[in-house]
Amino acid sequence: MLVLLPPSEGKATNGTGPPLDLPGLSFPELTGARRRLVGTVQRQARRQPGRLRTALDLSPRQRAEIQHDATLTTVNSTIWGILALRQAGQPAPRGAVRFVLRQQARSGGWAWYLNGKPDSNDTAAAIEALRSASVTGKPIRRGLAYLLRLRNRDGGFELTPGRGSDAQSTAWAIQAFAAARKPTPRGALAYLRRLRRADGSFRYSKRYATTPVWVTSQVLAALARRPFPL
């Protein structure tokens, strides 16, 4: 894969906008790939900063930028850290659970990064992580209510308002409701089944058929009503 980087990473400090808004970019079907790419950069910044500085060809004056790279996605990474530990049969750290609870927005949703705009995928993942840590009550109810506001007439769920339904957002929502032991929202399963292709894979949406292996793997878990951790 060839990744083209802009001349400047553009991580200016003291700004008022969100530091990274992947769900807000064009071509939402690429959000997953973008997240994996940013996650790789973040891990390298934490584990091998010298190697990353060399790969990015940073000057001595730019070396502090690596610290910014290491803190791009603390919310999403904490959610997945909880899920990974619970999958391994380990308890969720109390501090991590409290951190995720504090990041719930007024809307009831969760964002991928600190002080960001909530989206359905991260909200569902947060609900699943919190439920795996035995969290119940108001945070879960508020999160589910946020998800329902992203449900469309076709039965599917969208990543953010106005994006249109897609398979992964719908699968995430189904898994979140399963984690909360609530009925699957009406029409969600039917929406997913309509996206099935002749070869057995599932489309990302009615318009796009990107990343079929990844999309299909998540749809299958949702059709089985199996939340994370599996």
Image: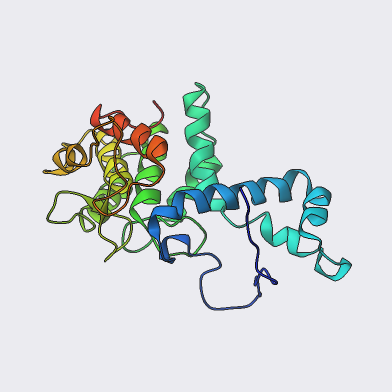
- By what rule are the colours in the image chosen? rainbow
Picture coordinates of residue 37, whole percent (x, y): 58, 50
Please count the marks in the image. Answer: 0
Q: Is residue 8 left or right of residue 145?
A: right
Residue at left 27%, top 36%? 180
Relative vertical location of residue 74 with respect to residue 226 in this rendering, above or below: below
Front residue of 131 and 88:
88
Residue at left 65%, top 69%? 6
As drawn, the residue found furthest toward the top would be: 89
Q: In this view, does 139 lie to the left or right of 50?
A: left
Front residue of 82 and 1:
1
Residue at left 88%, top 66%? 60
Picture coordinates of residue 23, whole percent (x, y): 42, 60
Picture coordinates of residue 99, whole percent (x, y): 51, 49
Which quadrant would the C terminus be assigned to in this image?
top left
Front residue of 162 and 136:
162
As drawn, the residue found furthest toward the front would be: 198
Quarter of the image for residue 66 reads bottom right
Front residue of 56 and 79:
56
Picture coordinates of residue 35, whole percent (x, y): 52, 51
As drawn, the residue found furthest toward the right would be: 60
